[in-house]
């Protein structure tokens, strides 16, 4: 079994301020833990390519994409929303982050890897069709899903999102796309204050109250995600892998542990093995308690390895 990891040095050059939680140190924490455990030695490493405008415009408004290119600063910072800014390196970082998921899809669809983890930033799942928000510029996982639909003509793609925040951007983009099953757990009420009232045959939102621990999270996934994934029989699974529901992460109020990420990944992997020839592409979303982030990603990748 071949597991690949995709990243790019430019992803560490995107900075939104010394005290911003979405910092380059997140990537370093993951890389350090992969080295410390020896896991990095068994992974195939790839540099992320730049996503093309064509790939971005499959999920984003063309005018929005154009404005991101035109407004990219040559110095200083440009704020896109109260939480999200660009420095002179941010456009390149965002293009590589989206391009990583495109490459991940190509690797698993061409049989060059059984699963892929994209260690990239900025994250993507809050970026909607026509706006940036919540630290996100382009919706990386959505760009990858659209690539799989367009190029590989897949009919059933599942996206699972266990970030502590609802993936409002992913839901916005695929709201009427029945070929994509979107399964999300998230703390509610909490930023971005969406998802709790969605009713759809292909969107499975599971709002969780603050204080939810690992056993309750596992019960929710077992009751709501797994039956729908089984019925859907996905040909490819994409994971919005946010690790900010960890008990050590003070970004929010869920109480997951390292092993809960191993558990949910193993459950998703069983579905992928059964219906999708094991094909999984995972992309980093949130996770801001650096030691917990590094450990949780190791658990996640180990579960992908089986």
Image (cartoon, rainbow, N blue to C red):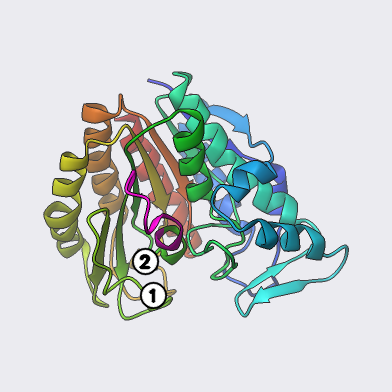
Image position of 260 (left or right of 304): left
> Closer to us: mark 2 or mark 1?
2
Residue 303 percent coordinates (x, y):
31, 37
Residue 158 in percent (x, y) is at 32, 44
Q: Residue at x 69, y 51 (%)?
A: 93
Residue 253: tell me if it is visible: yes
Q: Earlier in the sequence, mark 2 or mark 1?
A: 2
Name the residue rendered at 38%, 75% in the picture.
252
The residue that appears at 29% across and 58% down in the rendered structure is 257
Q: Nearer the viewer, residue 300 or 221?
A: 221
Secondary structure found at label 1:
loop
Left or right for 20, reference 210: right
Which dot marks residue 164? Answer: 2
Marking on residue 252: 1
Q: Quadrant of residue 136?
A: bottom right
Residue 23 occupies which quadrant of the picture? Answer: bottom right
56 versus 79 height, above or below: above
Q: Which residues are magenta?
A: 171-180
């Amino acid at each position: 079994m071949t597991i690949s990891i995709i990243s790019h040095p430019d992803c560490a050059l995107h900075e939104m301020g010394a005290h911003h939680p979405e910092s380059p140190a997140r990537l370093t924490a993951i890389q350090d833990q992969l080295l410390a455990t020896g896991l990095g030695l068994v992974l195939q490493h790839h540099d992320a390519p730049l996503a093309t405008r064509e790939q971005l415009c499959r999920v984003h408004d063309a005018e929005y994409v154009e404005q991101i290119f035109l407004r990219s600063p040559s110095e200083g910072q440009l704020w896109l929303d109260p939480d999200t800014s660009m420095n002179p390196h941010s456009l390149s970082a965002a293009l590589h982050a989206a391009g990583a998921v495109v490459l991940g899809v190509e690797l698993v669809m061409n049989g060059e890897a059984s699963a892929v983890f994209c260690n990239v930033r900025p994250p993507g799942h809050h970026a909607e069709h026509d706006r940036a928000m919540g630290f996100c510029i382009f919706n990386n996982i959505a760009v990858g899903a659209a690539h799989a639909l367009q190029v590989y003509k897949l009919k059933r793609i599942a996206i699972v999102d266990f970030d502590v925040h609802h993936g409002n951007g992913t839901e916005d983009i695929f709201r009427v796309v029945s070929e994509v099953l979107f399964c999300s757990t998230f703390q509610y009420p909490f930023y971005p204050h969406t998802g709790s009232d969605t009713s759809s045959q292909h969107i499975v939102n599971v709002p969780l109250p603050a204080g939810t621990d690992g056993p309750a999270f596992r019960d929710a996934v077992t009751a709501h995600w797994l039956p729908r994934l089984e019925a859907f029989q996905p040909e490819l699974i994409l994971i919005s892998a946010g690790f900010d529901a960890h008990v050590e992460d003070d970004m929010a109020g869920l109480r997951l542990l390292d092993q809960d990420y191993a558990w949910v990944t193993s459950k998703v992997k069983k579905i992928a093995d059964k219906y999708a020839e094991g094909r999984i592409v995972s992309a980093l979303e949130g996770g801001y308690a650096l030691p917990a982030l590094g450990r949780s990603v190791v658990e996640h990748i180990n579960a992908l390895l089986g």
